[in-house]
Image (cartoon, helix red, strand yellow):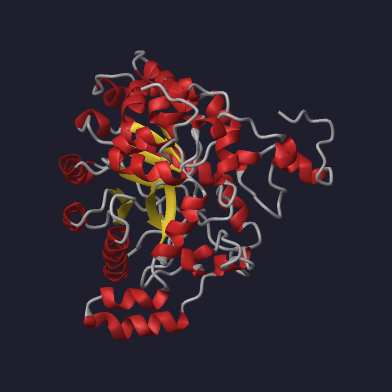
Amino acid sequence: MDLTSTERYVVISTDGHCGADLMDYKPYLQKSLHEQFDEWAAHYSDAWGALDPEAGEGRVGAASFGSSYNWDSDKRLEHMETQGVAAEVLFPNTTPPFYPSGAITAPAPTNRQDFELRWAGVKAHNRWLADFCNAAPGRRAGLAQIFTNDIDEAIREARWARENGLMGVALPGDHVLQLNNLYYPRLDPFWEACVELDLPVHRHGVVPSEAAGPETGVGAPAVGIFECYHMAQRPVSHMVLGGVFERFPDLRFVVTEANAAWGASYATQLDNYANEALVPGALASMFAGDAVRALSLKPSEYVAKNVYFASFFTIDDIALRYDVGVSQMMWGADFPHHEGTSPHTRKALRVNFAGLPHDEVRMMLGGNAAKCYGLDMELLTDVAQEFGPAVEEVATPLPLDEYPTYPSETVCSTFAPQAWRRAATGGTANGIAST
C-alpha cells in the first residue's frame, strides 16, 4: 500500500508501563494474604524514588509509580492520543505486593518463601492488568509477569494470561543479586508453552544494581546504569548458544528498552565465536564446540529470525536499521517514564523517521508490533484516523531550535546529542545546522 500525505500512521508503543495504585492490588490477592499485605504496605518504601523526587502528576519520571497515569484508564488514553499513539504494549511499573523494591529494579525471588509471596503479588498484578486492558479493547497488549523459579507455575500463569486476553510474558531481568540464566534445559517446557500459546517472551532493560546507601555505597546506581545494556543483551546469547531458538524456531523474543543498533554487532560477534568453535584445537572449540555443532543456522540467522528490538530509537539505531533488520525493530514511547519520549512523542517521531521510506516507517511504528502481538490493525487504523500522526508530519525534519530543552524538558536519548549540546550552550544551536 502506498502512503500519501493525507494518510496517518498507526503508532503502537511497544514500551509502556502501568500498574495499580498500591492498595488497589489488595482485592486481587487471596483473602488469606490480606493481613500480610497490610503489614507489607504499611512499611513499604522504594529507595529508587529518591533518584527522581519531582516525579508525579506533573512530571512522569524514573520513579513514576506514584502517577495516576499508571492506573487511570481514561486519563492515560487521552494523553496517549495527544501523542499520536493508538495502542500500547504494557510492562509493570507500580510495585506488586510483597516486592522488596520497585517492579523493574528488584531481583527475582531468592528462596521459596520469598517466591511464594512474590508470586502471589505478580499474579495480583496480572489480574489487575487484564482488567486494565479490557477497559480499552484492542488498544492494550498486556504482558504477564512470571518467575522461572517454578516452571509448572509459570506455564499455568502463561495459559491463564492467554485465556484472559494478555498478549505476552515478561521474564525477570538479570540483577547483581541474582542472574536469571535462560539456557537451562529445565526451561524448555515453558518455551514450548509460549510457542503453543503464541505468546512473545520479553526481557525489559532494568537498573540491575542496588540503590545507593551506607552498605552499597554511592557507586551502586552508577554501576547499574553502566551495566544495564550488557544485562539486557545477555539473554540473546543464552537463547542462541543454548539452542533454545533451534529447539523452538517459532519462539519470539523481545528485548525492550535497550536500543537496537547493538543487535548487528552482537550477531556478528556470535558468528565469529561460533566459527572459532568449529576449528579443531581452538580454545572456543573446547567450550562451545558441542553447542555450536547442535545448531542448524548461524547465530546471526537466529537473531534475525527470532529477536525483536523495542522502545524509542537513537540516531545509531535508525542508521543501522538494515543491519539490525527493519522487520525486527518496534518503536516505543516508554511512557510514563521521564526518559521516554512523552510529552514530545510527535517530535521524537520526526527525529527518528523523517526522510525514511514510508513502508519502513509504517513497519517500525506499528506494523511489526501488530504482527508480533496479533493486534487488530484494521481497528487501530480506524483509531489512528482520529489522532495518529500524518505521514507528512513525520516526514518533516525537526529543526534544532524545536528540540526539547535538556534536561528540564527531556532526557530521552532520541533527542541526543543535539538536545544535550543545546543545554551545554545555554539553549542555542552554537553553530549546529537546524536540519
List x then y, in percent, for residue 316: 58, 29
Among all residues in the image, which is located at the extreme front? 6
List x then y, in percent, for residue 89: 37, 49
Quick one: 235 or 337, which is closer to the camera?
337
List x then y, in percent, for residue 315: 60, 31
395 lies left or right of 426: left
Quarter of the N terminus within the rendering: top left
List x then y, in percent, for residue 420: 73, 42
Quarter location, residue 368: top left
Q: Which residue is drawn at 40% across and 46% down?
A: 86
Quarter of the C terminus within the rendering: top right
22 lies left or right of 400: left
Quick one: 265 or 55, which is closer to the camera?
55
Q: Which residue is drawn at 49% across and 25% down?
A: 321
Residue 227's place in the image compared with 397, above or below, is below
Q: Which residue is drawn at 16% across and 54% down?
A: 163
Quick one: 341 or 434, which is closer to the camera?
434
- The answer to whether any part of residue 305 appears in the image is yes
User: Count of labels shown?
Assistant: 0
- The answer to whether any part of residue 269 appears in the image is no
Quarter location, residue 288: top left
